[in-house]
Image (cartoon, rainbow, N blue to C red):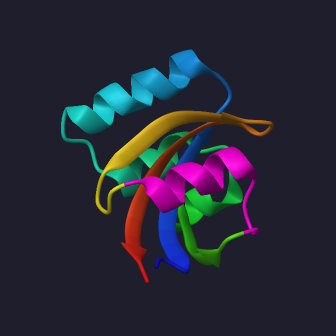
């Protein structure tokens, strides 16, 4: 059973911007580079890295996606009260 997820994310204001960044990622742009350039979250300065987190540490929509998502894939856009997230699951344990 997965107890913790190590994830990175890119937080943007709207669905349109999330899809625009997702297109860039699909065309081979680096997730870390896109996080530094576009993320509104302070974690953007650290390539979007949120570190390891367990259940109950993130908002429900984000947590559900991160825990259910496949390692290495970019997931989203996921809408939360903070905006729209593109989530990359780096590892699980």
Q: Place residue 38 in its image quadrant.
A: top right
Residue drawn at 29 percent across, 50 percent down: 30
Q: Residue at x 64, y 76 (%)?
A: 54
Foreground of the two, 53 or 32: 53
Judged by its main secondary structure, the magenta piece is: helix
Q: Position of residue 1 (x, y in %)?
A: 46, 79
Residue 77, percent from left and from top: 51, 32
**In this view, 54 is above or below 81:** below
Answer with the quarter of the image where residue 45 lies.
Answer: bottom right
Task: Say which quadrant the C terminus sits in.
Answer: bottom left
The correct choice, above or below, for 49 with respect to 3 in the image is above
Residue placed furthest toward the front: 1
Describe residue 26's horizontal placement relative to residue 46 as left or right.
left
Q: Position of residue 43 (x, y in %)?
A: 62, 62
* 79 sits left or right of 10 in the view: right
In the rendered view, would you say 21 is above or below 31? above
Provide residue 63's location: percent of width, then percent of height.
63, 57
Magenta segment: 56-69
Tell me if residue 66 is in the magenta stretch.
yes
Vertical placement of residue 93 versus 87, above or below: below
Q: Residue shown at 51%/72% (left/top)?
A: 5
């Amino acid at each position: 059973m997965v107890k913790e997820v190590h994830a990175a994310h890119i937080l943007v204001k709207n669905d349109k911007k999330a899809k625009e960044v997702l297109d860039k990622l699909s065309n081979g742009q680096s997730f870390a580079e896109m996080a530094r350039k576009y993320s509104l979250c302070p974690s953007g300065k650290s390539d979007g890295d949120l570190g390891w987190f367990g259940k109950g540490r993130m908002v429900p929509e984000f947590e559900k996606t991160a825990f259910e998502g496949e390692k290495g894939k970019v997931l989203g856009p996921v809408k939360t009260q903070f905006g729209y997230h593109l989530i990359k699951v780096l590892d699980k344990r």
